[in-house]
Amino acid sequence: MTDIYYSSTRGGERGATASQAILKGLAEDGGLFMPDKIPALDISPAKMVGMTYREIAYEVMKLYLTDFTEDELKSCIASAYDSKFDTEEIAPLARADGAYYLELFHGSTIAFKDMALSILPHLMTVSARKNKADHTIVILTATSGDTGKAAMAGFADVEGTRIIVFYPKNGVSRVQELQMLTQKGENTSVVGISGNFDDAQNGVKKIFGDREFAKELAARGYQLSSANSINIGRLVPQIVYYVYAYVKLLEHGEIGEGEKINITVPTGNFGNILAAYLAKRMGLPVGTLLCASNDNKVLYDFFCTGVYDRRREFILTSSPSMDILISSNLERLIYLSSGCDAAKTRELMASLAGEGSYSVSNEMREKMSDFRGGFATQEENAAEIRRLYDKTGYLIDTHTGVASCVYRKYAEETGDKTKTVIASTASPYKFLKSVMEAVSGTEKGAADEFSLIPEMERVSGVPVPAAIRDLEAAAIRHDRQCSPEKMKETVSDILK
Ligand SMILES: *Cc1c(COP(=O)(O)O)cnc(C)c1O
C-alpha cells in the first residue's frame, strides 16, 4: 500500500502523516489538510457484499491512515462502532417513496456527527502515542448544535484530553442545548456565545492561528486540536457510510454491479457531502451529488453562479445545524478543483476573509460539475416532512427534510431516475417541535418541547431513543457564556 501524506490547502505545510494531521486538526497556515492523492478502493463494492460496517470501515480508512498499523486501526474501529449504536447495521437504509434514506443517527447523540466522532477520540489517542505527544490535547470545537454534543460524548473522560465547545446561545434546538449542558466528564466545558455559528467557527479558527497563544499554552502543557470537520480525522470516517450504503444496495439487489447512484446531502459546513465526493473519486459509482441548503443558500448560489458571497443576512431556521454562511470544507473542493493550487486557494480564502466573497473560474467550475445545488425554504421543508409522512408513515427530521425536498424538486425538474441515497442526518426526536409542527400543520406555540415526546412516539412508531429519555431530568452541569470577542480569554480561563 502506498503511503499517503497530507498537505495544507494553503501551501504552508507539507508531508504530514495522517496521525500528525489528525493531531493538529488545522494546518499552521490556517489551511485544511488534504491527502496528496486520493486513493482508489482496492476492493470492489461487489467484493464487499456481506461485509459488516466495521469491515468496510477498515477497507476504506486503511487507504488514508497509512501510518496506522492494522491492529491500531482495527481496534479504533471496534471501539467506535459497537453497542453505542442501537443497531448492528450502524447505518441502516430505509426505503420510502422511492428513495433510500441512509440513517446516520443511530449513535449516542442521535445525529450523524456520531458516525465520525465516535472514532475520532480513538484516532486521536493513537496519533498522540505515535507522535510521542506528551501535552494534554485540548479539543476546541465550534458547533451549530450537533458536533458539540457528539464530540463531548466521544472525548468525555478520555485520558490526556480536554474539550471545550462553543455554541450559538440562541441558535440551537432545546434538545440540542440540554444535551450539551448536561454533559458529564471532568474534562468537558461548554460555552454559549452571543453570536451565530459563523462567529463561533471564526473565533475558534482565530485561536488556532494565534502562534503566541499556542506557545503560551504549550508552556502550560497544552496542545490544541479540533473535532470539527476541518479535521481530516472527521472526514475519512464519513466516507465509509457511502461505500457501505452502496454495498448494501447491491447486496439487497436494489442496484446492479457498477450501477451509478445519486447522493443527496443536507449541507452546512460541506463536510458530509465532501466525504461523498471523495467516495466517488475513490471509484464508487456515483453520479450527481446534490448539495441541499436551507434558507441560508450560499452554496446553492455558489453552484449556480461560481460566486461565493457570504454578505447576506444570517437566517435562523428549523434546520439549525445547517445555519452556516461560511462552509469551511468547501476550501477542500476549491483546492481540488484548482488542480491542488495552494496559492490560488490562499488567494480565494483571503478574498472571503477580506471582502466576504470570491469567484472561481469557469475551468474550476467545470471540475465541480459533479455537484448540483438545491435549496428548500422552511415552508417547503415542513411540507415535505408532512407529505412523506402522510404518504408512507416514515418520519424524518428537519435537516433530512431539506434534502428530501431538494431531491424531489430535482427529480421532477430533470426527470433523472437514478436511484438516490439521501443522507438522513438526525433523528426527528432531536427537533421535536419543528417536526411535530410540520406533521400536524399547526403551531405548537411555546409548549415545552418535551411534552411532544409521546405524540412523536405515537406518530412515528419509533421508540423514544435513550438519548432523549433521560434528558429532561438530567442535571445541568455547564453555564458559561461569553461574547465572540472573548473566546480566547475564556479558553485561557478554563485551562487555568
Ligand atoms: C452537521 C449537520 C449537518 C450538516 O453537515 P455538514 O457536514 O456540516 O455539511 C446536517 N444535518 C445535521 C443534523 C447536522 O448535525
Image (tube, rainbow, N blue to C red):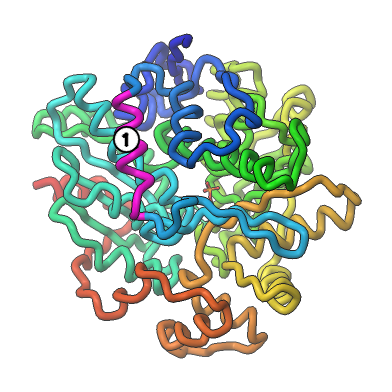
Which residue is located at x 44 percent, y 18 percent?
Answer: 6
Q: Pinpoint residue 153: horizontal percent, then vertical percent.
A: 29, 54
* Residue 306, quarter of picture: top right
Q: Secondary structure at mark 1?
A: helix
Tell me which amino acid carries mark 1. Answer: Cys
From where the camera sits, is residue 19 visible?
Answer: yes
Q: Pinpoint residue 479: horizontal percent, then vertical percent.
A: 22, 67
The number of numbered badges drawn on the structure is 1
Instruction: Using a 10 Å C-alpha cutoff, classify the residue at mark 1 as few (fewer than 14 neighbours), some (14 to 19) or many (20 or more).
Output: many
Q: Pinpoint residue 494: horizontal percent, then vertical percent.
A: 15, 51
Q: Pinpoint residue 17: horizontal percent, then vertical percent.
A: 36, 17
Which residue is located at x 64 percent, y 81 percent?
Answer: 439
In the visual, does 379 lie left or right of 28? right
In this view, 348 is above or below 109 = above
Q: Which residue is identified by label 1? A: 76
Q: Which residues are magenta?
A: 71-84
Q: Viewer-proximal residue, 368 or 74? A: 74
Q: Viewer-proximal residue, 115 or 317? A: 115
Q: Overall secondary structure of the magenta stretch?
A: helix
Magenta span contains residue 398: no
Which residue is located at x 57 percent, y 81 percent?
Answer: 436
